[in-house]
Amino acid sequence: MTSATTETNRAEATTQGPLTPEQLQKMNAYWRAANYLSVGQIYLKDNPLLERPLTLDDVKPRLLGHWGTTPGLNFLYVHWNRLIRERHLDMIYIIGPGHGGPGLVANTYLEGSYSEIYPHIEQNRDGIKRLFRQFSWPYGIPSHVAPETPGSIHEGGELGYSLVHAYGAAFDNPNLIVACVVGDGEAETGPLATSWHSNKFLNPATDGAVLPILHLNGYKIANPTVLARIPHAELEELMRGYGYEPYTLEGDDPLTMHQKAAEIFDRMLDRIAEIQKAAREGGSTERPSWPMLIMRTPKGWTGPKEVDRKPVENTWRAHQVPFSELREKPDHLRLLEEWMHSYKPEELFDEKGAFRAEIAEIAPKGRLRMGMNAHANGGLLWQPLRVPSFRDFAVKVESPGETIAESTRVLGKMLHAVMEANKETKNFRVFGPDETASNRIGDVITGTGKTWMAETLPVDVDLSPTGRVMEILSEHMCQGWLEGYLLTGRHGFFSCYEAFIHIVDSMVNQHAKWLKVTRQIPWRKPIASLNYLLSSLVWRQDHNGFSHQDPGFIDHLVNKKADVVRIYLPPDANCLLSVADHCLRSRHYINLIVAGKQPAPQWLTMDEAVAHCTTGLGIWKWASNDNGKPDVVMACCGDVPTMEALAAVMLLREQAPDIKVRVVNIVDLMTLQPQSEHPHGLSDEEYDAIFPPKVPTIFAFHGYPWGIHRLTYRRHNHDNLHVRGYKEEGTTTTPFDMCVLNNIDRFQLALDAITRAKRTARKVDDARQWYSEEIQRHRLYVAENGEDLPEIQQWQWQPDKTQ
Ligand SMILES: Cc1ncc(C[n+]2csc(CCOP(=O)(O)OP(=O)(O)O)c2C)c(N)n1
Ligand SMILES: [Mg+2]
């Protein structure tokens, strides 16, 4: 594309369109200012207003930043400002290509929010100098639309999640408009490609609006984008196929483009208002075709057209810093100076370096400024979740192991009550990739239903435009919607099959980073925690087999900062209730709860469960016979491992009656870490009191065994810690055979105890013999009968009568 527009056309352009000549001139000046400040942030550390000839001393030694996407983002910001003012919109702006950070910093500076939040970045020459210098500078600010950037809820460093975040923000925010720029490269990612379908879940009567802009600047880092190289009609068809009404804005002449954009945005906003009115006043329940914009503008728009005789504007070469080597190539310094002068800074900033009032006045004021919108600092809007007493859902446990219950089903009842309690405030949603019922928390659906704006058939149940349980077969969407929902001040809960939560590993990384950084930013207020329930667990995916067996998300989360993650493995339903209550009330964490859905023995009364979960781990005296002096500690973490450990304790009574066993159950995994590493970590004294020095511990763990070693490697007696867990053996087989395949079964645990405890040293050979006979018997039976041995299936905990 070339800027071939003649002066005559320009003059016409000023009169053609909704903008008055004065508005047009001011909006264009505002845009020039934002572009100027963006370039300045990338290149300069001094001489911010180019009041003297540029020298190499004014230029940063390391040029770090992205120009290509920035002018497009800035262009849109100016237009949102007009619309916010004229229509009194409550609007936030999500930037998919978050590498356009300089643009958002520039705009929040120009509208004044930046200086209010960061008073040292003043509205004068010094302030601009600091603004430039801090960008991508050690201990300055990041290059992306990071948590430090006012108005941001989306860093955009990892591409793909802008649109899903935008929808998450819009749910239950009927007055909010979320403008969302999707990079045309970003649009190639899997999550983004699916995000378009979010419109089947957005209710125009009760939710806000999302205004997607596909930023078709043609290029990524080093390649053209797919969507820029298909015929325009095909692209429009694609968008129609996704259920949108596409509008197109194309061109490169600034003045013409402002008029065109203003005209198109007016139409799009009118259309949004019409859709909302039809749903809110006219009672329409149709799924509307929401407007979206295809913005086809040059990458690096208004930047250098050519550098070293190679085209830059409107090519991938404009992606980052359009040219560097300023020290080596003197003409590059001149090129930079010319480029920056082309924005005419002297017309934009006064003699003190303040943005000229007559241009600045076109921005919205106060809280309407996008940098100050409270939705983008969700903690400001956060209200505590109403959590009814979890004790009301307690499972009655007369004696350990007597009652059988499905833990997650019990939790489902509690979640239903939470849903009911927050019906009025509409600030709680439950998310799941088609697994809410399968994970047996389906009671939460009762009454509220599942969100659905697409077609329904008579066979459908519980689908509703006002449903509050959100199900779509995309872990990415569940995660992204929930993040957007939380970041704008609400609460939520995500239940997922354990094995497939890995699909969002990368997204949770980004969210964890956001939480870590915002914790250190005083003006960012804490948001509700991101709560996961993982069910359909590795040990009981016997019907689905190997593909569904992976407990590794625990390891993934353990990598995160200690002040961000909490990991709980409640051994039974009452513990699950207590843990869930705690997680739902907490703020600014990622809480992982791992709990089974299959019928399983229940161990603790509600009071015992509360006490156990409060300390996070504890000695189960009712299962121990050590009287303070154990020969071996049988530790267990997770529901199936707990059952196997207890069954091993019973076997030990027969095989090694004189062995003194202590049973320790761990709910809160982080208690194992040293106190110096995690706030939940036990002190060494407390740890040693539970896991006494010199005494071997046989640890049955739900996940990969090395996870426990990693957490405890600095603990005393670590050499004497022997962990059994999942070691990547799996298939479609019986539940107990899954344990046998991974050597976490009761026979193995009992043998481990006999082998490791000093008192039973003489019995090791016999025990080995016994073990191989039992396993042989199990294998033959399972192969022959297709189910577990009767005594395994009917196993029940028996107290030690000799105690
Ligand atoms: C998931 C992911 N993969 C790769 C990258 C590396 N990356 C950064 S920018 C970029 C190109 C983005 O192109 P586009 O979305 O078109 O943005 P724009 O042209 O507006 O800069 C890539 C591949 C990334 N940030 N995230
Ligand atoms: Mg692009």
Image (cartoon, rainbow, N blue to C red):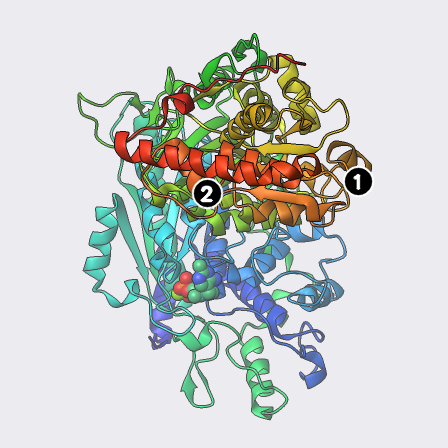
Element type at marker 2?
A: loop
Please name the amino acid that badge 2 sits on. Asn
Q: Give the percent coordinates (x, y) of residue 307.
A: 47, 86
Asked whether disc 1 touches disc 2, contact meaning CB atoms under 8 Å apart, the reply is no
In terms of image quarters, where does ligand 1 lie?
bottom left
Please name the amino acid that badge 1 sits on. Asp
Q: Report the front residue among 31 and 117.
A: 117
Q: Give the percent coordinates (x, y) of residue 566.
A: 62, 37
Camera-near label (1 vs 2) is 2
Q: Earlier in the sequence, mark 1 or mark 2?
A: 1
For this orientation, the residue located farthest to the right is 685
Q: Can residue 389 be seen by looking at this rendering?
A: no
Report the number of numbered marks. Answer: 2
- Residue 684 disc label: 1
- Residue 496 disc label: none
| 504 versus 630 height, above or below | below
Looking at the image, which residue is at 38% across and 33% down? 778
Report the quarter where the C terminus lies. Answer: top right
Report the quarter where the N terminus lies. Answer: bottom left
Residue under numbered circle 2 = 742
